Image: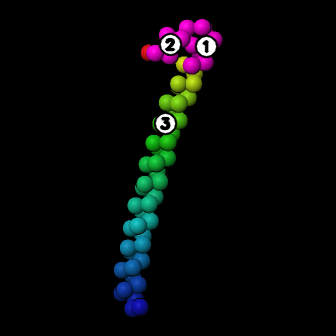
């Protein structure tokens, strides 16, 4: 493989790596949002059970 071909392949691999890193970062951000939403749901359920007010779960 010539040096020019090697550089072209290297750039292709680096671009793939950048895309993979971007997808990973986006996935982590989405997971954090879902985790926060789930924690909010657990807090609401806990509050509803402690206050014996299940109507809180329907809002």
User: Vertical placement of 2 versus 21: above or below?
Assistant: below
Q: Secondary structure at mark 1?
A: helix
Q: Residues within 10 Å of mark 3 (few under 14, many from 20)?
A: few
**How far is the residue under mark 2 from the one under mark 3?**
20 Å
Residue located at (42% from left, 62% from top): 18
Query: In the image, which is nearer the foreground, mark 2 or mark 3?
Result: 2
Percent coordinates x, y for residue 43 in the rendering: 57, 21
Left or right: 53, with 6 as reference point: right
Residue located at (44% from left, 60% from top): 20
Percent coordinates x, y for residue 42 in the rendering: 57, 24
Left or right: 21, with 39 as reference point: left
User: Vertical placement of 21 versus 26: above or below?
Assistant: below
Q: Secondary structure at mark 3?
A: helix
Percent coordinates x, y for residue 36 in the rendering: 52, 32
- In the image, 53 versus 9, the foreground residue is 53
- Label whose residue precedes the other's in the sequence (3 or 1): 3
The range drawn in magenta is 45-58
- In the picture of the structure, the residue carrying the numbered disc 2 is 56
Q: Residues within 10 Å of mark 2 (few under 14, many from 20)?
A: few
Mark identifier at residue 14: none
- Label whose residue precedes the other's in the sequence (2 or 3): 3
Task: Pick out the residue farthest to the right.
Answer: 50
- Label whose residue precedes the other's in the sequence (1 or 2): 1
- In the picture of the structure, the residue carrying the numbered disc 3 is 34
Residue 42 within the magenta-colored segment of the rendering: no
User: Vertical placement of 3 versus 37: above or below?
Assistant: below
Q: Are marks 3 and 1 in contact (CB under 8 Å)?
A: no
């Amino acid at each position: 493989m010539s040096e020019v071909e090697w550089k072209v392949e290297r750039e292709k691999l680096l671009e793939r790596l950048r895309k993979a890193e971007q997808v990973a970062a986006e996935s982590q951000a989405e997971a954090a949002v879902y985790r926060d939403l789930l924690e909010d749901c657990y807090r609401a359920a806990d509050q509803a059970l402690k206050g014996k007010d299940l109507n809180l779960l329907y809002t």
